[in-house]
Amino acid sequence: MDSNTRNEAVLKVDGLGIDFGGLTAVNNFAMSIKHKEIAGLIGPNGAGKTTVFNMLTKVYKPSRGTIVFCGQDTANLSIVEMSKLGIARTFQNIRLFSKLSVLDNVKCGFHQSITYSPLDAIFKTPRYRREEHEVDRKSRELLKVFNLSNEADVVAASLPYGGQRRLEIARALATSPRLLLLDEPAAGMNPQETEDLMNMIRTVRDKFEISILLIEHDMKLVMGICERITVLNYGMTLAEGTPEEIQSNPEVVKAYLGE
Amino acid sequence: MAKSIFSSLFQNAQKRNRTVSFLIVIIAYAVLESMMRSGNLSSLFTSLLVPMTCYIVAAIGLNLNVGISGELNLGQAGFMSVGAFTGVSISGLLANTVPNDTVRLIIAIISGIVAAAIFGLIIGVPVLKLQGDYLAIVTLAFGQILKSIITNIYFGFDSAGLHFSFVENKTSLLPGGKMLMNGPMGATGTNKISNFTTGVILILLSLIVVYNLMDSKSGRAIMAARDNRIAAESTGIPILSTKMLSFLVSACLGGAAGALYGLNYSTLVPAKFDFNTSILILVYVVLGGLGNMTGTIIATIVLVLLPEFLRSMQDYRMLIYAIVLILIMILTNNEDLKVRMSRFSLKSILMRKKG
């Protein structure tokens, strides 16, 4: 990325909304994320946070609004095309390829970057061998970053909970994204694990030079690592700002604690 | 060196399973072929060998689609019939131009594969947008439709060229002409050029194709799409083309099997490839274990031979066949039993002695 785009928004969302039948789940949602920024998306249960993620990755087609990613309008792109463009994500309820090995889960992330054809695979051509070797090397490197090297050949479903969460992030990073969406990465973790996760998220941002947007209920984590926070309530943006601004915002306090 | 290659073949459970599947095929071939040559195999048994290899190839293909990709496909017999009648017709057309039987058989099998692939593509696009039961129903219907179409094809050639019609008697051939497909009567007067050796080579080739695919990004994508569709798409794996690949490979293997099958008989009726045949192949796959090619091969061999060995039971034959099916299902899926059995395995006995 050259210096011009460095300060520009990686992601720019405007007027985003979606209706399910007569129900408006998200309305007029706006946010922007800069390069190498860690941003947070918070809000009470049912506010529409995951729905926003699903729209950003095109799991749901937004009814209104624009999503501009790295200067490109994404109006007609599919889930796969969003991934190609550079948005990767994890899921609130972990979605691993449960019957594949830990290593193969990460290798799946490299799917788009592998260029050999099925025929190359059937005949095991030099091109197949070269690329597979490369993918194997890169995947093991990623596993090392996430402390999963020893479990490389284990079936993903048999990993402990924390390991599954880390594997999901490793798989997402294998797609070489420019923006990583983390949906409640600390859910179900104890304080120590959460602490480790915070450090890991920072390391990921610095090492892979990407922007990160996370949904999280753990306020310590959110306030600790996010540089900008967007608060969502009833499908609408309630507030946006730095952690300090959000903490002292009376609207936000009201939404969380009631009057 | 030789030892290291040998040990690498048995490195982990997956590789062991694969090596075993190749070994089973090669050893079974060596035994059966030598028995056949020395005249120790009854004619009934000999006549079962080629169909058995055909069913194994079709089942390996279907296992990729049903076992590994997780799509319930009830139309494998349809692809077999496309392959069979294409193969038989091509072989009939080339009878004079390509006198060498082996070459003609290979051409016939390849054309069977191509035809099955074309039909797979046409059907796959609408079918693969469906999931679960709907996919099963549509593939079932497709098998029936193909059977009905082939039942009404009249196709022949004479000195004036090719003749094709969906109406009987519209294809009156000049003297010296030959009908290749005769409506419900199917293909008659086919030169029987299939042989056991070709069948076994075909099995080995299909194993190589399926195993190599599974070791590649395509194989990973197929399993990823099965395990979690949304996560696969979010990871950049296009679902439709991934499913299409497994569907097509399955169809192609069905087509190859069909061509080999068709050229094993002088007469072949379209009704042979009905719904029951699709179910039969599915039974081989399910009994052998979803995604388990070795199991599929063993299940097919056992279930093709079983009804013949039970012939002496006469009327009770199919009853016993059904009971055996049910028993295998129960026994192979009983965790409790598996644990008990594992106590008596060689490995655990050795371990106990050591301890």
Image (cartoon, coloured by chain):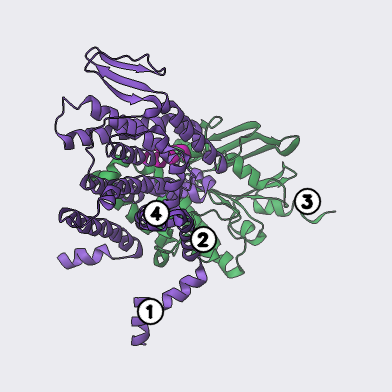
Chain colours: A green, B purple
Horizontal and vertical percent position of residue B194 = 23, 40
Chain designation of label 4: B
Percent across and percent down for residue A132 are: 31, 50
Horizontal side, residue B111 vs residue A168: left or right: left
Which image quadrant is residue B246 in? top left
Crowding around mark 3 (Cα neighbors within 10 Å: few <14, some 14 to 19, many 20+) is some
Instruction: Find numbered disc 2 in the image and state the secondary structure of the residue it sits on.
Output: helix
Q: Quadrant of the C terminus of chain B?
A: bottom left
Circles 4 and 2, Cβ within 8 Å, touching? The answer is: no
Q: Are marks 2 and 3 on the same chain?
A: yes
- Circle number at residue A17: none
Instruction: Give x and y (percent) for residue B276.
Output: 46, 43
Residue B180 visible: yes
Query: Closer to the camera: disc 4 or disc 2?
Result: 4
Q: Mark 1 points at which residue?
A: B348
Q: Can residue B129 be seen in this view?
A: no
Q: Write down the residue under mark 3.
A: A255
Subunit that carries the residue with mark 2: A
Which residue in the protein does label 4 denote? Answer: B307
**Residue in the foreground of this view, choosing between B201 and B147:** B147
User: Which residue lies at the image location 28% right of the left edge and 65% below the top edge?
Assistant: B10
Q: How far apart are marks 2 and 3 (CA)?
A: 32 Å
Q: Residues within 10 Å of mark 4 (few under 14, many from 20)?
A: some
Instruction: For mark 1, give the secondary structure.
Output: helix
Q: Mark 2 points at which residue?
A: A164
Please check whether the numbered discs 2 and 1 fall on a single chain.
Answer: no
Name the residue rendered at 21%, 47% in the picture.
B197
Mark 2 vs mark 3: give the one in front.
Answer: 2
Q: Do the residues labelled 2 and 3 touch (CB within 8 Å)?
A: no
Residue B246 belongs to the span the image colors magenta = yes
